[in-house]
Amino acid sequence: MSKSITVLVPVFNEAGNISPLYKHITAVFSELGGEYQCKLLFIDDGSTDISLKQINLLMEGDPNVRCIQLSRNFGKEAALSAGITETDSDAVILIDADLQHPPAVIKDFITEWQRGADVVIGVRKKNPDEGLIRRIGSKVFSYIMQKISDVPTVSGATDFRLLDRTVVEEFKHFTEHGRITRGLIDWLGFTRAYVYFNAQKRHSGETRYGYRKLIALGFSAVISHSMLPLRIAGYLGFFITVFAGGLGLFILVEQIILGDPMVLEIPATAMLAVMTLFLNGILLVSIGLTSVYIAKIHHETLNRPLFVIRKKQSHTTSSRNT
Ligand code: UDP
Ligand code: MG
């Protein structure tokens, strides 16, 4: 029996892109020669244009096309999650509707999947729609995420991915809200492969992710995948306390106990400043400590699984037969 693959497309006002995207994707699968059963799942994320009409037209002509209509615009992350929870194919491919993710790359995804990768990640080499500021912003964000994230990430990694069924099943267990789909997929681990591609220009329409939305998304990604921001106050406090403590001790010994043998004549205001600095340091350390507890609460409320099992083996089970 041929394996089934669901191509998942989040759609928010993409009327001009749906038909060309469908043509490209079906062309890719027919090139693969019916080896895989391709299903298309559109998630209409509250479109206000004729996107839904376009999808309906496709559904009339092709029983492999399905659509889930969200009640309003929930954003791409929620749309992707909605789609992933609705699939039961052997693999799921996430792809943007605007043809920025070239469907031809799907072939490479499938090759890597068949070689044993559970997650195949599309890594963008260049993005023609990206101006200088966006490019720098995206580089800086990637760098920060790589440094502070609990799991390793690759610079330029996109949402354009293939997920094996095992990964999809694990993904369905996430309950957290402010989610970044690709961050959660990274968190899950599993065997990964990377496919590099040149991003294309948006086929029709405009991006919905302005700077404000991107910054908010970046902030949310940092907050939900790293505890570092919470610890910063603590680290800062520690340095200030040590520095002011050392200085204070020096003043105490040199000025008060030994009677200023180095003739520094440190004024009383300076001593007061050192004392204030020291107390501020203690205060920041306390905030840092409180933050550690808040981090723990934050962690618990995310309610992520404690661990994720890739597969269970014993001498009776054969190796994975994909
Ligand atoms: N999208 C969505 N909901 C939104 C915004 C975007 O489902 O609220 C979809 C959009 O239709 C497209 C994909 O997410 O398929 C990427 O959106 P866009 O091209 O605007 O983002 P960019 O490529 O600039 O990151
Ligand atoms: Mg786009």
Image (cartoon, helix red, strand yellow):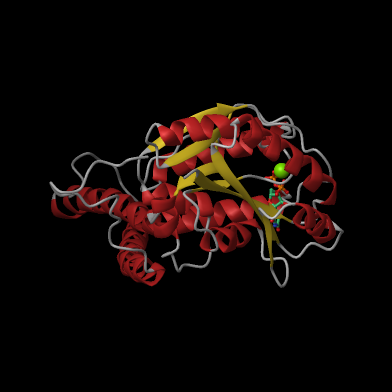
- 145 vs 13: above or below: above
Q: Residue at x 84, y 60 (%)?
A: 53
Residue 125 lies in what quarter of the image? top right
Q: Residue at x 30, y 56 (%)?
A: 308
Front position in the image: 76 or 220: 76
Front position in the image: 94 or 219: 94
Front position in the image: 140 or 310: 310
Can residue 159 be spotted in the picture? Answer: no
* Extreme residue toward the front, this view: 1
Q: Residue at x 38, y 40 (%)?
A: 152
- 247 vs 279: above or below: above
Give residue 179's position: percent from left, percent from top: 52, 60
Give residue 240's position: percent from left, percent from top: 33, 52
Front position in the image: 234 or 172: 172
Residue 305 lies in what quarter of the image? bottom left
- Count the labels in the image: 0
Give residue 107's position: percent from left, percent from top: 56, 31
- 281 vs 16: above or below: below
Q: Residue at x 25, y 53 (%)?
A: 245
Can residue 217 be spotted in the picture? Answer: yes
Horizontal side of 156 relative to 73 (left or right) equals left
For the C terminus, give its image quadrant. top left
Horizontal side of 41 relative to 178 (left or right) equals right
Give residue 315's position: percent from left, percent from top: 12, 46
